[in-house]
Amino acid sequence: MHERIIYILFMDTGTYLSRLIHLYTKQSLNHVSIAFDKELTEVYSFGRKRPRNPFSGGFVREDIRSKYLRHARCALYTFRLTEAEYEQIRHLVSQFERNKDQYRYNFLGLLGFLFRIKIKRKRAFFCSQFVATLLRHSQSFKLTKPTCFTKPEDIRCQEGMTLIYQGILGDYDRQPMMVNEEIVHMKKASLMFLLKNKVREMVMR
């Protein structure tokens, strides 16, 4: 069966809203987007329509090279889908884009998320709610809670998520190979650390 890849981008945008969410989640990368190409020219989420106005939120196509995002700390993951799942998610995003003026950022739903109150709203999403709603169309995406209570970290911890880049977003297209090598080195270092601890435990016995 032919597989397709999508890209899930987690960011720390440094906004007041991001800091508020951090107080609740205790996680640093509290904004999540979905992308369809390795170059990240097609990145979609729910966020600010105008960077200087925190209340102008809705469906957005994000420019990772913009002044607003290029300095953000980020982690980029890949997730594999079947051809049918990929096409369905692309179709849904196209529908969002065609009707983008009808969608709003779900500020009320975000408050419900923070206080564990389920609030249903039509045509309104926050970022992780949007991405989780799309990924529910993949059989390999196992969501154990309603999308309105889904944190970016819940998506990031899904089985099948593969880290390919971690660092400053603006550096992504300038040194991807070096960063990939660093990730491999980090994995090897972690393995060595685990082995050393295991040996130490055996010696102490």
Image (spheres, rainbow, N blue to C red):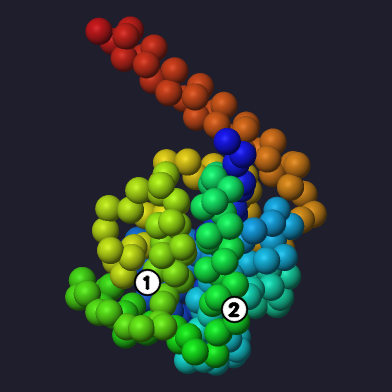
| Residue lying at 60% horizontally and 89% vertically, measured from the top left | 50
Does 204 sit above or below residue 150? above
Q: Quadrant of the N terminus?
A: top right
Q: Nearer the viewer, mark 2 or mark 1?
A: 2
Pick whichever, 51 or 80, lies toward us: 80
**Residue 189 marker:** none
Crowd band around label 1 with a 10 angstrom C-alpha radius: few (<14), some (14–19), many (20+): many
Q: CA distance from mark 2 to mark 1?
A: 26 Å
Is there any visible trace of residue 189 in the rendered image?
Answer: yes
Residue 163 appears in view:
no
Asked whether, in this view, residue 131 is left or right of residue 69, the answer is: left
Direction from residue 76 to residue 150 in the image, left or right: left
Secondary structure found at label 2: helix
Q: Residue at x 58, y 63 (%)?
A: 90
Estimate the x, y position of residue 42 in percent, counting from the top left: 68, 66
> In the rendered structure, which disc, 2 or 1, sits on the residue that comes first in sequence?
1
**What is the quadrant of residue 170 in the picture?**
bottom right
Residue 21 has which mark?
1
**In which quadrant will I find the C terminus?**
top left
Q: Which residue is mark 2?
A: 97
Residue lying at the far right of the rendered structure: 174
Pick the residue in front: 129 or 66: 129
- Image coords of residue 47 (percent x, y): 52, 79
Taking the spot 52% from the left edge, 68% from the top edge, the residue there is: 92
Which residue type carries mark 1? Ile
**Residue sitting nearer the eye, 122 or 1:** 1
